[in-house]
Amino acid sequence: MTQEVDSSSESLRERIPSRPLIEARQLSVVFQQNEVLKDVNVSIRRGQTIAVIGESGCGKTVFMKSLVGLVKPTSGEVRFDGRSLEEIQFQELTETRRRFGFVFQNAALFDSMSVFDNVAFPLVQQAIASKDEIADRVMCHLAEVGLPKEVARRQPAQLSGGMRKRVGLARALILRPEVVVYDEPTTGLDPIMSDVINELMLDIRRRYPVTSIIVTHDMRTARKVADRVLMFYPRHRLEPDDPQVIYDGPPSELEHAEDRRVRQFVHGEAGERMNEMLQAMA
Amino acid sequence: MPLRADKDVRLSDTTAPLPTTDSEQDPNLDHDSQWVQWVAGCGTRVVHGITMIGDLSLFTWQMLRWLVTRLPCKGTLLVTFYQVGALSLPVIALTGTFIGMVLAVQSYVQFHAIGLDSHLGVVINSTLVKELGPVLAATMLAGRVGGSMAAILGTMRVTEQIDALTAMGSDPIHYLVVPRFLACILLIPALTVVADFMGILGGYCYSVIILGIDHAAYLSHSRDGVALFDLFSGVFKSVFFGAIIAIVSCYQGFNCEPGAEGVGKAATTAFVYSFVFILAVDLFLTIVLNSVYYSFFPNDSSFL
């Protein structure tokens, strides 16, 4: 019986082409005269955990914000669940955004609200739960990210960096999103707290069937949490026809990547950048 | 509110430096290219100004659309109303009182010289009710509330809180701008009346107690000198001033440049632009309201 179910679901999977959940097609973003992204093509399948790495200013955050429609592409498109964000009407785009959970670099907690109100905010705005249910879910999510009950009453300004990130994570998860997007989740944290955040990301992945996109500089995060790594290279340092994504593969292969720039980044070597800087100084 | 990469691209097209390849070889060409650059610079500023007006109009339109489709929740509104109205009350009452007194001090010498001391109240009260009350209340509100709005929203922009709102499926204009707009337009008339009242009181106290003007004559002339329409025109204008403060300040906050300097600049620009717009709109509305008034009462003069 089990075999029958398995085989039928297998054949169903074969018949229905598994389309990517998120897809960037020829995505280009230009700010003023600064070309940040050019012709980026990336497909992300449901359930994947992707780490987006690259040096500062290479367009990782812009890429991530483009995926949720926070940055409008200059050309190209982003498709979510088979539909282009450009085609989606305002109300539907709002609904689509609720399928994402967003953990911002500095948590982006609302200063004027307590931790409880910050985590409850998406639920309150949706008006989809009673007060008791909201309270239960908020406390449950705070516990999930390892924060004690007392934290709920505090203001964001009274929290440490690690606590802020965890509150941000609880807020991102409260609507049970399909995709969780992390913007530099371990930046500015000590190694132990960084590892706590990494473990939390893994835990969330185990607990919920989410697709995760992690923008990070931290190779430990990329190696530990991701099952696929994309490396972006700054557009201004590339030839016009060069692809901007210079690595797309498993984290285990990063060390042995053919591209020297990938290996340099992974090992944290300045390489020819130092020569460039010295030349500029001269 | 999504960052507008497409808009920036359009702007960048106009700000692109013009080619100046042969300028070193030919001085005439150098002169010409300087002219071309000057003209291009002027054009860029004009385009930038038009773009900003367009952006501001779109921003206002989006805000008005939310205003008629869905109001923010009561909790958000009450907090904003308290911050804009109740917290502005002491400062507006105090400045209103001083302005009334200053008007008495400034006008007394001239009025005393022609023996019209008891008519001082007419000038103080009508000036306050028609002009100084609404403009003063608006100026104080632009400084206290407008600057604060721009700084708060600017900080929210810089620290990605506005992006977080959008990412969570809320509309930042609905959540942040609509309550502030409503608070400004609904409470500024009340604050204007307070400024008027305190100014009149300050002027009366200074004139009667310090300058020794007969209080019965002062009150009698004051009552005769100020028409209901004067009070109406002041309060009517203040609604527009409130709208200007809210829209300009929120717009500046939403379009804040990164960093502490960007937030400071947004707050300053919000106050300066609000003040300039308030005075310009004041002039326009005063002309219109005077035309309306004198078309109904062509021979009316409230001074003597």
Image (tube, helix red, strand yellow):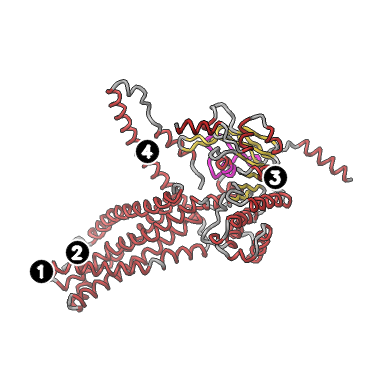
Q: Amino acid at mark 4?
A: Val
Q: Mark 4 or mark 3, which is nearer to you?
A: 3
Q: Earlier in the sequence, mark 4 or mark 2?
A: 4
Q: Which residues are magenta?
A: A64-87
Q: Which residue is mark 4?
A: B47
* Chain under disc 4: B
Task: Tell me the amino acid under the disc marked 3.
Answer: Lys
**Residue B82, placed above or below residue B164:** below
Type of amino acid at the residue the image marks with label 2: Asp
* Residue under the point 63% across and 42% down: A80
Q: Pinpoint the chain carrying mark 1.
A: B
CA–CA distance in space, label 3 to label 1: 89 Å
Q: Earlier in the sequence, mark 1 or mark 2?
A: 1
Q: Which residue is mark 3?
A: A224
Q: Circle 2 marks a residue in which chain?
A: B
Mark 3, other Cα within 10 Å: few <14 / some 14–19 / many ≥20: some
Q: Is residue A69 magenta?
A: yes
**Mark before the other along the chain sequence, 4 or 1:** 4
The question of residue A159 being in magenta is answered with no
Between label 4 and label 2, give the one nearer the viewer: 4
Instruction: Chain letter for mark 3, please.
Output: A
Which of B274 and A13 lies nearest the eye of the viewer?
B274
